[in-house]
Image (spheres, rainbow, N blue to C red):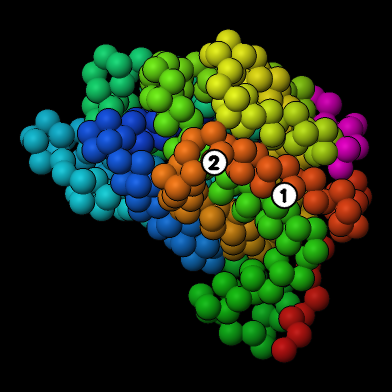
């Protein structure tokens, strides 16, 4: 039982941190949208947070491998307490202006990127230490993420309604502190990080930051499955960000349902996604990965865009969210297991950080793209365009043969790559 303490602690820390993050994902766009009335400014703030997040996550990979993911994750959590806490403090002092908010969310994103990447790089060590399968760990992680989506959305709606969007971020700041404490106490059993070893030739290869970064990139780009996953997820993340950060808030405002509807959608989606993730944690090892991927994306993609575009009542929107959320619970456990088992242990930090950063690379533009679509064509056409793009992106793998390799399970850690060709 003690061997699984680090895994349980990591899951608990993720639950705390992700709940706080989900609060900020609702509170910040709502704060900008209600104080400025501008969808474009809302998109700018989203971009200001996500661009540094993606860039710093990509660049932090070699540091994660050298210092150890645990150290990097703890530093990011504790530093984020001060940065996120600055928003409600400045709000109370009447010093929170739009340019100031943009700077703060940019710094917060710069910290969150390496922190998120480091926490993901911990997964193989947690799996090895606890003696569980990758599908089980990624499924439980997915369940935690979905549960945080549900509880964070509900809590955000309540906090924004009662104390205001800016003050709701106090909870986000506290969540970073609590997450750091739990992670620090529970993962001591993993031990200190070992000095990184170059997986090619430690005698002739220069051990440098840029060399490590290039090695991670070379490994990633030579794996056709990882490249296919990164490309697909990057595009769907762009559309998902436009949906959650812009299209849903605008729909809630225009339809008169208000911020409570945003929270209700999050709860409906998160609750069934949690159930799906728990089932994936238990049964994903036995399921065909590619078929599971296709079915999950069919039910979790287009319907949620279509129901908003058709002006359906709230109960119908929630019903679609219930079904779509359940399907989404199977996606990350399957893709996560494929990604982790294809990466050699000595390169885990840099490759997972690069992989995640590339998957998130288009997210900074999501709010802006959503804002442009709404401003140029209106809400309903913007939703139809986003839904169609989502369908094409997620179903394209059905005609791409490299995706079939998902069903070829590998042992962990993966074999070391061949020397890079120059």
Which residues lie in the magenta part?
Answer: 281-291
Q: Main secondary structure of the magenta part?
A: helix
Looking at the image, which residue is at 25% across and 42% down? 82
Q: Going from the N terminus, do you reach mark 2 or mark 1 first?
A: 2
* 390 relative position to 400: left or right: left
Question: Does residue 328 appear in this view?
Answer: no
Q: Which residue is mark 1?
A: 393
Q: Is residue 334 above or below residue 264?
A: below
Quadrant of the image containing the C terminus: bottom right
Looking at the image, which residue is at 80% across and 51% down? 396
* 12 relative position to 24: left or right: right
Mark 2 against mark 1, which lies toward the viewer?
A: 2
Question: Does residue 62 appear in this view?
Answer: yes
Alpha carbons under labels 2 and 1: distance apart:
17 Å
- Give percent across and percent down for residue 206: 58, 84
Quadrant of the image containing the N terminus: top right
Q: Which residue is mark 2?
A: 382
* 34 relative position to 369: left or right: left
């Amino acid at each position: 039982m003690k061997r699984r303490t680090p895994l349980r602690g990591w899951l608990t820390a993720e639950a705390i941190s992700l709940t706080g993050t989900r609060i900020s994902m609702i509170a910040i766009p709502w704060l900008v949208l209600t104080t400025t009335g501008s969808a474009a400014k809302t998109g700018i703030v989203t971009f200001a947070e996500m661009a540094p997040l993606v860039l710093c996550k990509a660049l932090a990979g070699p540091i994660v491998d050298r210092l150890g993911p645990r150290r990097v994750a703890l530093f990011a959590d504790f530093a984020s307490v001060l940065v996120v806490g600055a928003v409600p403090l400045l709000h109370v002092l009447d010093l929170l202006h739009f340019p100031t908010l943009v700077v703060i969310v940019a710094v917060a994103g710069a910290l969150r990127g390496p922190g998120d990447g480091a926490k993901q790089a911990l997964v193989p060590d947690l799996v090895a230490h606890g003696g569980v399968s990758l599908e089980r760990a990624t499924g439980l992680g997915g369940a935690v993420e979905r549960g945080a989506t549900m509880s964070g959305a509900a809590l955000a709606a309540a906090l924004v309604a009662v104390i205001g969007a800016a003050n709701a971020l106090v909870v986000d700041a506290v969540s970073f502190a609590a997450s750091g404490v739990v992670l620090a106490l529970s993962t001591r059993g993993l031990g200190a990080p070992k000095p990184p070893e170059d997986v090619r030739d430690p005698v002739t290869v220069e051990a440098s930051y840029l060399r490590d970064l290039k090695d991670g990139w070379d490994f990633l780009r030579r794996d056709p499955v990882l490249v296919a996953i990164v490309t697909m997820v990057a595009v769907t993340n762009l559309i998902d960000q436009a949906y959650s950060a812009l299209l849903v808030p605008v729909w809630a405002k225009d339809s008169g349902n208000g911020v409570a509807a945003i929270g209700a959608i999050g709860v409906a989606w998160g609750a069934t996604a949690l159930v799906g993730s728990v089932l994936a944690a238990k049964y994903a090892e036995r399921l065909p990965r590619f078929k599971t991927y296709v079915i999950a994306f069919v039910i979790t993609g287009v319907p949620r865009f279509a129901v908003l575009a058709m002006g359906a009542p709230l109960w119908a929107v929630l019903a679609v969210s219930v079904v779509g959320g359940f399907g989404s619970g199977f996606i990350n456990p399957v893709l996560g297991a494929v990604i982790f088992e294809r990466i050699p242990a000595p390169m885990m930090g840099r490759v997972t950080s690069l992989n995640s950063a590339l998957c998130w690379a288009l997210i900074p533009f999501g709010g802006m793209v959503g804002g442009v679509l709404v401003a140029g064509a209106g809400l309903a056409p913007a939703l139809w365009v986003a839904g169609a793009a989502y369908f094409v992106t997620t179903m394209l793998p059905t005609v791409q043969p490299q995706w079939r390799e998902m069903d070829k399970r590998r042992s962990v850690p993966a074999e070391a790559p061949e020397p890079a060709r120059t």
